[in-house]
Image: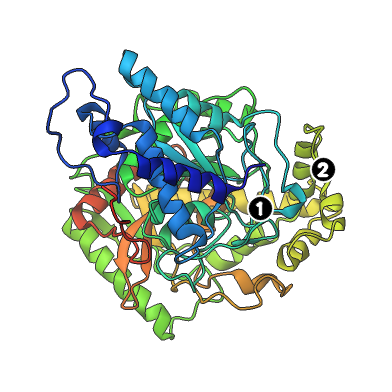
Amino acid sequence: MLDRRLIAKVAVTLFLAATVGSAAVQSPGASASPAAFSLLEATIDDIQAAFHSGQITCRRLVELYLKRIEAYDQAGPSLNAVQNLNPRALQEAERLDAAFRSSGPAGLLHCIPVLVKDQVETSDMPTTYGSAVFQDFVPQRDATIVTKLKKAGAVILGKTTMGEFAASFIGSAFGVVRNAYDPARNPSSSSAGTGSGIAANFATIGIGEDTGGSIRGPAAVASLVGLRPTVPLVSRFGMMPARPTTDTLGPITRTVKDAAILLDVIAGYDPNDPVTIYAIGQVPASYTTFLRKDGLKGARIGVIREPMDSNTDPDSDDYKKVKEVMDRAIVDLKALGADLVDPVTIPELKDRIRKVHQDNVFETEQAINSYLANHPTAPVKTLQEILLTGKVVPRRASQLMNNVGRSTDELGYLQVLLVKEETRQIVLKLMADNQLDAMVYATYDHQPAVIAPDVLTNPDPQGVSNVGNNRRLSPVLGFPAMTVPAGFTTDGLPVGIEFMARPFAEGTLFRLGYAYEQGTRHRKPPATTPPLPGEP
């Protein structure tokens, strides 16, 4: 395996040896004096316009992102967001440049650099699941989501650090991921590498995975857009499972439109993941058709004010700082034309979330064992073997031990399913009775916590969690949810506002989220990772 820092240094050397003029490749009809291209916060549209104007090539774009990763991921603020870089990224960029010169864009994501959570398989670089147990494991296949990205012309720039076996933000393969806005603070949960990496502009867009909030949490604390799709919408084939009834993959991006474009690429039926059959007939021609600046006008939205986390402290100054931001966000929703039902109340909310999410220890071992059985070259074949290696960080090991010996054949699992269905009916009735298009709440009621110095050695599972967690409701119900930047606290930390809609109502989320984003413009990049000298 090639060292990722060595790859980045080689890429930077090549970049410095090239000039803007010699790197540019003019497409037919390109302007001789194209408008300036800015890498920081560049969107899919910005990059495609730069390709067509001839101001930038795919190779140069990839080199620019590699330079940022070298400067800020291990050096600078040391975000530790990228686990492995793609050793073929520059070669792939050159191939795409040649294709562009001969026939135009290779697909919807032509040369859009993507960071992918290391939970999904890539046949050309290691897939570690955040664990030293799989440090050098290179699967013999690509995950469906990776295949779709490549087919659309994207460049898989690298795999991101992830909470070991899909929990928290620490792992034996890499250590600790750090928040791009304050590296001393918690970057949220297992898609933290993707969240910090996209916030710091290490790539254009990213892929996360959400079992109980791991797309929306990292997005919320990084001033990003994070979409948890309805479970059957995006194939999980080639992804190590954590809890199959709630596992899903989705976009982490800097804008709502980029998330819509990315979902266009990854959504849809895959025979390798039979649950996606339910998505047939549910996928529009393009999710971008829902993007309307006036999308909040007349929308009926229920506001959930009640904290969903039993550890939330409404009397704390920290809570009040987030509440101040959320109160402004609710006012903005109304000013942008939303018809609010404020508040709406779900009976026994905290208890229902606990019974369906925290108490569900029945799926994980069977799911992991079945997954590993399909990998003859995997270093271990069962969850028990993983734990017996002694390599898993203590906190994650103690969590996983609770799943050993448990099965979906147990009566306790039936109770989980019964409470889940009962809760779904309660919420669907609440939405119907109030004619709601969506519900809204803070992704977190508290700011991200300071990372403890013993985070890698302390076995207490609670020590890596941000308090004020409201992310569980969506997976408990099986509803899609999208977090969008709501602004910053007085401490300069991002707050996410989360929209939740009925199953397969992603279009509604894009309509509401885009209108809120365009009407408020809260996203701003972290001060820790500014433009580099010479960066366009």
**Tag 2 residue:** 379
Q: Which residue is drawn at 35% across and 24% down?
A: 285
Instruction: Please indicate, yes or no, whether residue 377 appears anywhere in the rendered image.
Output: yes
Instruction: Please indicate, yes or no, whether residue 290 appears anywhere in the rendered image.
Output: no
Name the residue at the front extreme: 17
Identify the mark nearer the N-term, 1 or 2: 1
The vertical placement of 299 against 374, above or below, is below
Residue 184 horizontal/vertical position (percent):
49, 74
| Side of 339 where 66 appears, left or right | right
Residue 83 horizontal/vertical position (percent):
59, 50
Q: Disc 1, disc 2: CB below 8 Å? A: no
Viewer-side residue, 2 vs 404:
2
**Tag 1 residue:** 130
In the picture, which quadrant includes the N terminus? top right
| Side of 397 where 301 appears, left or right | left
What kind of residue is marked 2?
Pro
Name the residue at the top extreme: 102
Q: Residues within 10 Å of mark 2 (few under 14, many from 20)?
A: some
| Side of 220 where 459 appears, left or right | right
C-alpha separation, residue under disc 1 versus residue under disc 2: 14 Å
